[in-house]
Image (spheres, rainbow, N blue to C red):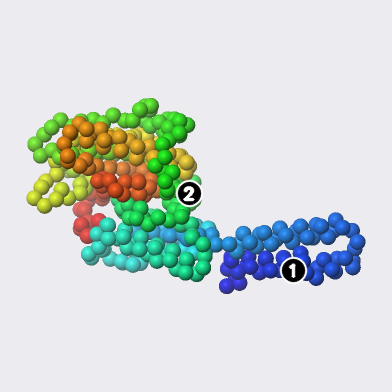
Amino acid sequence: MLLSREGGGTVLMASSTAVALGVVPSILEQWTTRQWVLVVVFAGALALVLAGWVLQRPRGLGVVVSLYPADRTQASRVAALKNASRTAHSATLVVDRAVLWPGEFPVQGRSDVADFVARLIDAQIEELRAGGRAEPEVALYVLAHLQDGFLLGRRLADDIQLSLTVMHLSQQAGRSVIPGVEIGSSLRAALTPPQRTQVTRLLATPTRDSPQLVEVPAAAGARRHRIALIVRLASASSMVDDARHVAVTGQDSYGPWHHTGYRLPPAGPGSTEGPCGAYLIIDTGNAYLPDDSGVYAAVTTYIWECWQAARQEWAQRLGGTTAVEGLLFFHGPLPVAVALGWLTARDRISLVHHDLRLAQGTAPPSPAGS
């Protein structure tokens, strides 16, 4: 216990307090009458007391979540997240699918796994509260498919925490772990003019207004109440074209030898997939977003605003009582996907999973292990 950060801080505070107020001043008075010496020693001891307090105080909870299957988990990336959390926080919770479920999921669906992770986080927070600590700040270190991150964000919207930050494993800075998006009500606040200008400058086709909602010509089997939100925030040359093809045709491949890799969600019993009624594209081209939490937050809010506006516009065009649904085709930083899940937790929108192995022409995994 004494070798821990908190234990070391307690020892430092106790010993420094003794130096400042105990026997050391009395000894110095017998050795010298110079007041500045006493002042310097007293000030130094107070500085050490403050340093001990900083070391001793709780530093929140780090939650490391790895949801890749055992055969796809990169141990070095998981280790980087664990080390970052243990360095920065008083407590660390590790939820590693490769350890909990060494094989493929036998029965659990993606939503079930997200719910399981959220329950573990809740339990850890309650344990910290029971220990007499203040409400902990929570930092989420996630390594998962974008769809799993999106679903986790939706589930976490049910649990109001004092502070929740989704961390980012940067590929641009040598796999360093940096703040990604701080999740909270500020994400729903309207963008300031500087923020809006910052976001629009990142777009491949800058525009001062929201991107245009493009209507798909009516076709047999079309699901007119659905709109596709296509978002590219990182390098993926064919992503926009592939997603648009799926949205316009309702088909996940161009032919028997060219699959887009997208897996449309089930249409429901007795129904089939079909073209969407309209689509919207938010595209930064093949450039990556700068590693800046402020940029991530502004881009997240911008996407959410565009979705809200598109949903309202399409509902007005349909003129009926059918609820508008969204299909989110997303390629970008995982923290943004988690934050979008949190923001749209009460909306009818699903993130469409993209399977690289399927897109490359290899056999897809079984639905239970996807």
Dot 1 corresponds to which residue?
18
Asked whether 50 or 364 is in front, the reply is 50
**In this image, 207 relative to 35: left or right?**
left
Where residue 11 sits in the image (x, y, percent)? 66, 69
Where residue 20 sits in the image (x, y, percent)? 76, 64
Image: 269 above or below 209: below
Q: Quadrant of residue 227?
A: top left
Query: Which label is found at residue 110?
Result: none
What amino acid is labelled 2 in the image?
Pro
Question: Mark 1, residues whose alpha carbon is within 10 Å: few (<14), some, or many (≥20)?
Answer: some
Q: Quadrant of the C terminus?
A: bottom left
Question: Mark 2, residues whose alpha carbon is within 10 Å: few (<14), some, or many (≥20)?
Answer: many
Residue 359 seen: no
**In this image, 166 relative to 246: left or right?**
right
Where residue 35 sits in the image (x, y, percent)? 87, 58
Q: Quadrant of residue 104?
A: bottom left
Could you tell which of marks 1 and 2 lies nearer the N-terminus?
Answer: 1
Residue at the image position 81 percent from the left and 68 percent from the top = 24
Query: Which label is found at residue 179?
Result: 2
Secondary element under disc 1, as helix, strand or loop, is: helix
Give the label, 1 or 2, closer to the camera.
Answer: 1
Residue at the image position 45 percent from the left and 39 percent from the top = 295
Residue 179 seen: yes
Residue at the image position 17 percent from the left and 50 percent from the top = 266
Image: 7 above or below 174: below
**In this image, 15 relative to 267: left or right?**
right
Secondary element under disc 2, as helix, strand or loop, is: strand
